[in-house]
Image (cartoon, rainbow, N blue to C red):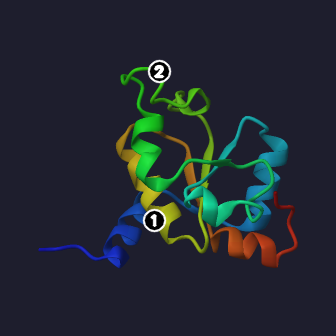
Amino acid sequence: MAKTFKDLVAEGRAVAPMISVNDAEAQMASHPETVVIDVRQEEDSHGNAVAGSINIPLGLLPLRADTELPEHYRDARIQDRSLPIITTCGAGGQASLAAKILHDMGFTNVKIMEGGTTAWKAAGKPTH
């Protein structure tokens, strides 16, 4: 049976917990090794991203997170499978897909920002 976007989002949310923007901000402050990954296309996130986040578009995430591909494909910031990661996007759907990808790749500490960057901005949190 074919899956819908909604089905894929549900799969991501089944393997990674949602985290509120306040809890995400607290985690970033108390665990500075936390990596916040914005999975939107760069042109969609530029100037409108969680302060301190890195941009890795959803389509490139499996390449950047891989540990066996040649170095020029990988992102050194996300090679540790136990690293605390929070995924985000505009509203949370794509972030859920990203969490599922990372989970399937062996990452053990992934959370999804509830409401994405839209909720982050609405809460008055810093952006870049």
Amino acid at pointer 1: Arg
Q: Residues within 10 Å of mark 1 (few under 14, many from 20)?
A: many
Could you tell me which residue is drawn at 41 percent across and 31 percent down?
66
Residue 26 versus residue 121: which sits nearer the camera? 121
Q: Nearer the viewer, mark 1 or mark 2?
A: 2
Label 1 residue SS: helix
In this rendering, the answer to whether 101 lies above or below 118 is above
Residue 43 location, quadrant: bottom right
- Image location (x, y in percent) of residue 109: 55, 43
- The residue where tag 1 is placed is 13
Q: Is residue 73 above or below residue 55?
A: above
Classify 10 Å Cα crowding around label 2: few (below 14), some (14-19), many (20 and above): few
For this orientation, the residue located farthest to the left is 1
Check the picture and name the quadrant holding the N terminus: bottom left
Numbered marks: total = 2
Q: Tell me: 52 left or right of 77.
A: right
Q: Residue at x 52, y 28 (%)?
A: 79
Give residue 112's quadrant in the image. Answer: bottom right
Q: Secondary structure at mark 2?
A: loop
What residue type is disc 2 on?
Glu
Q: Residue at 41% across / 62% down in the picture?
A: 12
Quadrant of the drawing holding the C terminus: bottom right
